[in-house]
Structures are given as structure tokens and as C-alpha cells.
Amino acid sequence: MVRKNIQNGDLVLRRRPNTANVGKLPPKWEGPFIATAAKRPGSFHLTNTEGRTTNHTWNVDNLRRFYI
């Protein structure tokens, strides 16, 4: 298991759902989003660039740090 150092306020990309069945050309990641810590450790709410926050949380295994 790889330990990811994603913290509150970091820019992240999220894994697109069902990418295993679509082939190798479409992107497997979407974003960037701003990670906002949730109540459970290792889960985050995501806020897009327009300021909209997701309703559900995303596990750190489905997130990747985004560097500018």
C-alpha cells in the first residue's frame, strides 16, 4: 500500500469511474479539485474550480496530488 500525503487544501485529481472498460485513450483522471478534509481519516470532499463541493466523500486511494 502506497501512503499518499494529501492534506486539506491540496490540489488533487480524481480517478474517473469505470475506466477499466473504456480503453486506453480516454483520460483516467479528471480535475483539478481542491481537497477538503472530511470527518473520517483518508476521505475528502472535493471542490471544483467554480466553487461547487461534491456531496459524497472520496477515498484517498482514488485521488492523486496535482502539481502546478
Image (spheres, rainbow, N blue to C red):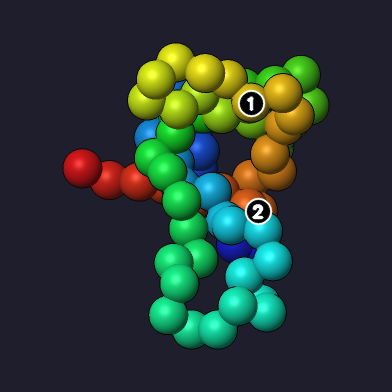
Q: Residue at x 51, y 38 (%)?
A: 6
Q: Residue at x 39, y 35 (%)?
A: 11
Query: Which quarter of the figure is the N terminus placed in?
Result: bottom right
User: Depth-wise, is mark 2 or mark 1 nearer the camera?
Assistant: 1
Of pointers 2 and 1, the one earlier in the residue sequence: 1
Q: Amino acid at mark 2?
A: Asp
Residue of label 1: 54
Q: Amino acid at mark 1?
A: Thr
| Furthest-bottom residue in this view | 23
Is 65 or 56 nearer to us in this picture? Answer: 56
Residue 43 visible in rendering: yes
Kindly report the distance in space between the C-alpha atoms of the residues bearing marks 2 and 1. Answer: 17 Å
Q: Secondary structure at mark 2?
A: helix
Q: Position of residue 30 (x, y in %)?
A: 46, 51
In this rendering, would 44 be left or right of 8? right
- Whether residue 14 is situated above or below residue 24 in the rendered picture: above
Residue 8 visible in rendering: no
Q: Residue at x 35, y 46 (%)?
A: 66
User: Which of the 4 image quarters holds residue 22?
Assistant: bottom right
Q: Residues within 10 Å of mark 1 (few under 14, many from 20)?
A: few
| Mark 2 vs 1: CB contact within 8 A | no
In this rendering, would 21 be left or right of 66? right
Q: Secondary structure at mark 1?
A: loop
Residue of label 2: 61
Q: Residues within 10 Å of mark 2 (few under 14, many from 20)?
A: some
| Furthest-right residue in this view | 40
Query: Which quarter of the figure is the C terminus placed in?
Result: top left
User: Which of the 4 image quarters holds residue 49?
Assistant: top left
Q: Position of residue 18 (x, y in %)?
A: 69, 66
In this rendering, would 32 be left or right of 45? left
- Whether residue 13 is situated above or below residue 33 in the rendered picture: below
Q: Position of residue 40 (x, y in %)?
A: 78, 26
